[in-house]
Image (tube, helix red, strand yellow):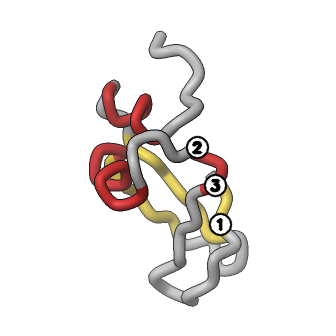
Amino acid sequence: MAGPMDSVGRAAKTNMLLIVECGHCYHVGRFRANDVAKVVGWNKPLETIRFRCKRCSRTDTGR
């Protein structure tokens, strides 16, 4: 087991896939944690990352 994932950098080190669902239209997006870490920073907590839905452009996503 990888242990608790408190930052995107820790998830990237274990090659995790982040699955994000839009709370409005239920569109599901899949992102490699390594790619997300390069954009938002390696020490960013997973709960604070804001994703925008590709379908409806809202930001109310669940992780």
Q: Are discs 2 and 3 less than 8 Å apart at CB?
A: yes
Please report the residue visible at 40 percent of the width from the left and 57 percent of the height from the top. 30
Q: Give coordinates of residue 14: x percent, y percent.
A: 34, 25
Q: Give coordinates of residue 34: x percent, y percent.
A: 29, 44
Outermost residue, bottom direction? 56
Along the line of sight, which residue is nearer the eye, 27 or 14? Answer: 14
Please report the residue visible at 42 percent of the width from the left and 58 percent of the height from the top. 40
Q: Which residue is mark 3?
A: 48
Check the image and report above or below for 5 versus 43: above
Q: Quadrant of residue 27?
A: bottom right
- SS for tag 1? strand
Give the numbered dot on residue 45: 2
Q: Earlier in the sequence, mark 1 or mark 2?
A: 2
Q: Give coordinates of residue 37: x percent, y percent.
A: 36, 49
Q: Give coordinates of residue 6: x percent, y percent.
A: 58, 31
Type of the residue with mark 3: Thr
